[in-house]
Amino acid sequence: MRKSFALLLALPLLLPASPGLAQHDHHGTAAPSGASQPAAVTGTGTVRKVDAAKRLVTLDHAPIPALGWPAMVMDFKVAAAVDLTAIATGQPVEFTLDGTQTITALRPKR
């Protein structure tokens, strides 16, 4: 019985790490292990909420193929250089994310 228990405890150490296991970022989305994130990615969406004090924007965004993300609603941190007074709730926007998935550019969609 003791040998079986010891084997169960050691099993995670004996199994090789799978490269397909997911790692979760601060937005709760998954990316494959070892997958590198592009330096800058663009997307489009609609503003659902702006929290200027916390530098957060909630976007209902279209799929972002470069990240493997489907369309969804999520919060994004916004860089200090981005003017949040230029956008309003309900407005369609284009945005750029950096490698940490922080919005570095946010502009009304034309």
Image (cartoon, helix red, strand yellow):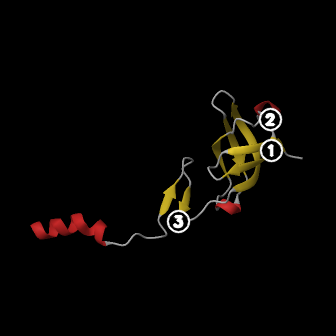
The crowd level at tag 3 (other Cα within 10 Å; few <14, some 14-19, many 20+) is few
Name the secondary structure under disc 3: loop
In depth, the one of 10 and 45 nearer the eye is: 10
Residue 85: quarter of image: top right
- Residue 3 position, x and y percent, is 12, 70
The crowd level at tag 2 (other Cα within 10 Å; few <14, some 14-19, many 20+) is some
Q: Which residue is mark 3?
A: 34
Q: On residue 82, which mark appears?
A: none
| Residue under the image location 66 percent in, 58 percent down | 70
Question: Of circles 3 and 1, which is in front?
Answer: 3
> CA separation, marks 2 and 3?
35 Å
| Chain-order first, disc 3 or disc 1 | 3
| Residue under the image location 78 percent in, 34 percent down | 83
Disc 3 residue type (three-letter): Gly
Q: Which residue is mark 1?
A: 93
- Residue 87 position, x and y percent, is 80, 35
Q: Which residue is mark 2?
A: 87
